[in-house]
Image (cartoon, grey):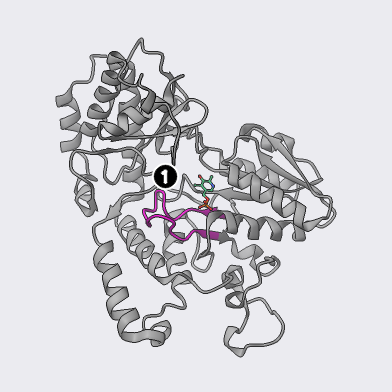
Amino acid sequence: MPELTDSDLEALDAADPLAPFRGRFRMPPGLVYLDGNSLGPLPGAVPARLARVVEEEWGGSLIRGWNDHRWLDLPLRLGDKIARLVGAGAGEVAVADSTSINLFKLLAATLEARPGRSTLLVEEDTFPTDAYMAEGLVRLAGTGHRLRRAPAHELAERLDDDVAVVLVSHVDYRSGEITDMAELERAARLRDALVVWDLAHSAGALPLALNADGARLAVGCGYKFLNGGPGAPAFLYVAHELQATLRQPLSGWLGHADPFAFESGYRPAEGIARFLCGTPPILSMSALDEAVDLLLEIDRDALREKSMALGEVFLRLVDERCAGFGLHRACPADARRRGSQVSLAHPQAYALTRALVERGVIPDFRTPDVLRCGLGAPYLRYADLGLAVDTLRDVLATGAWDEPRFKTRSGVP
Ligand SMILES: *Cc1c(COP(=O)(O)O)cnc(C)c1O
């Protein structure tokens, strides 16, 4: 195969059906952004939406906004939109709280739903907050539950009749590897165990089929591939089949059957509303709402196709243009097994990341040695990948990364 040239990349951009969507984001000129899996870029329609919500809705309507602008049901209205992105039904998704908090709520609900079982089977390499939240829950519950850890690909075979719940990321945050949802759900159902899926690196990045794959419980993040802005609210999914039997412990008033009756005791709402807790953050939820509207315009299959093509081109460019510099693939070779990212391992990954950022190419670093490149298919161009890989080669070839200022760790890596 002949090497990819820059004009090949331009031809790919010219034929890209998603190309018009790039202009719907505010992307600083000259920047190659490979970190939409940590913080998605700003959709162009968000500033005006936020100005409207602040000036007209809050400023003009004040307390009447809860009814007049339907703020109160925004968590469920927006949940229904996200449901369409993840292959869930209406009334199965709610937007609330953070991913960490939603994990706590759903994990706690599963422990109560599987009395007599004492194991939480947690993916070994999970994003730390997931395991931390499970640890905190077990300590608080004081019921002798314990965490058992296993690699994602071994979870199905590690299931036994003591496992109440399995906690796993659908797409691994470091390697980008996908865990087969339908397969693990089948295995879990045979053992009557529940699975909580973390969709932080899946929702908005690739088409999901939660209903069709038999998924019953999931949480997801609003500020990564959903582009909802820094600290955007998260979401949770509970399949209809489980909603009536599960109860979550953060029994705040907005999960009550009749919040404004101000009853003295808690009665959970019917349906997904029982997984809400307190008052929704309307400003940040409005930004997420606008961002999700934009994603809903994009054909899901075209998005996946481009995302896989970006990954293939990126890895090929790295092979062709950065050979001999000690980079190794740290992600699955098969595009169908990868989320929307590629990961490269290098002993100096941290300093490389810092040097790249200074040159206007923004990936991120994940300990111990991974250079992680998120591939936001709605806004990335193939030519951006050429520029990123050329910059990477330059940083490696000149040893530009080898400066003390790139090696001291500070702030968000
Ligand atoms: C980003 C991420 C989170 C983030 O949790 P927060 O509560 O938003 O801080 C959780 N889990 C995974 C797998 C993530 O990638």
Q: Quadrant of residue 363?
A: top left
Task: Kindly identify the amino acid type of the residue bearing the numbered disc 1.
Answer: Ser
Q: Which residues are magenta?
A: 218-236
Task: Locate residue 250 relative to residue 396 in the image: left or right.
Answer: right
Q: Quadrant of residue 318?
A: top left
Mark 1 sits near ligand 1, with its Cβ under 8 Å away = yes
Q: Main secondary structure of the magenta part?
A: loop
Residue projecting furthest to the bottom: 261
Residue at point 37% right, 68% down? 286
Report x, y in % for residue 386. 23, 27
Q: Which residue is mark 1?
A: 38
Height in image: 241 above or below 368?
A: below
Rendered-image quadrant of the C terminus: top left
Residue projecting furthest to the top: 324
Height in image: 15 above or below 27?
A: above
Q: Secondary structure at mark 1?
A: loop
Residue at point 36% right, 81% down? 69
Report x, y in % for residue 79. 47, 65
Report x, y in % for residue 247. 69, 67
Residue at point 56% right, 39% down? 180
Rendered-image quadrant of the N terminus: top left
